[in-house]
Image (spheres, rainbow, N blue to C red):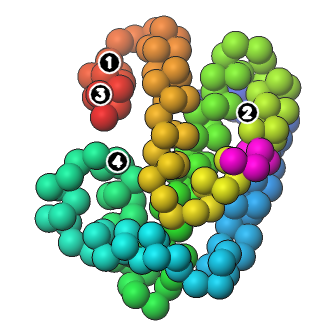
Amino acid sequence: MKKILDLGRQYWRHAVGALGCFAVLSSLYLFKLGSLTGNLSNSERALVATTKDLHNLLLDPLFLPLKLLQYLFVTLGGNTWDSAIRLASVVLGVITLVTFGYIIRRWYGFKAAMFGIALFATAAWVLHVTRNASMDVAYLWTIPTLIALPLAWDSLSEKKWAPYIFGAYLA
């Protein structure tokens, strides 16, 4: 317990900075998400129609993590909440930012990671892809994840997480 408290005292500024950056960027992605284009586009309506049934998702496992998130949010949100389908893209986009920040922190340090996340998160393409309910966010998520998994593998002192990392890598 003493080690945890010492770590908290030593790194509290980093934790507050990271949480503040996360809160600002998440609010940027969630700002007026339901009224992005006034209503759902035709492609977004098609996604809602295909994600209502779990059987259809399992027949075509391409983009399965994104489709499962969309199924979860559409099921929980129902048909009355238009931004439920877009929320899955936002969640995957925020996971991408965390993964991207991990890569930059491992390669260049904490300050460069915070600045890099801010630049990456406010790029026009990232903003568009993350706030739109399309499959393009899966491509955005895949590349940093595939780079970060070997970095995480090397940093583990104990290899007890090896099956989980390998499974995430294959997914």
Q: Earlier in the sequence, mark 1 or mark 4?
A: 4
* Residue named by callout 1: 162
- Residue 157's x, y, as percent? 46, 9
| Sequence-earlier tag: 3 or 1 | 1
Which residues are drawn in magenta? 121-125
Residue type at mark 2?
A: Gly
Is 156 located above or below residue 89 in the figure?
A: above
Disc 2 residue crowd, few under 14, some 14–19, many 20+, Cα 10 Å: few
Asked whether 149 or 80 is in front, the reply is 80
Where is mark 3, residue-wise?
170
Q: CA distance from mark 1 to mark 2?
A: 27 Å
Question: Are discs 3 and 1 less than 8 Å apart at CB?
Answer: no
Question: Can residue 164 be seen in the rendering of this structure?
Answer: no
Q: Position of residue 152 (x, y in %)?
A: 50, 18
46 relative to 35 in the view: left or right: left
Locate residue 27: give its quadrant: bottom right
Residue visible at 55% across and 40% down in the picture: 140
Instruction: Please give the name of the residue rendered at 77% of the width and 14% of the height, measured from the top-left corner.
Output: 108
Nearer the N terminus, badge 1 or badge 2?
2
Residue that badge 4 annotates: 63
Residue 159 visible in rendering = yes
Three-letter amino acid code at the position of disc 3: Leu
Q: CA distance from mark 4 to mark 2?
A: 38 Å
Q: Secondary structure at mark 4?
A: loop
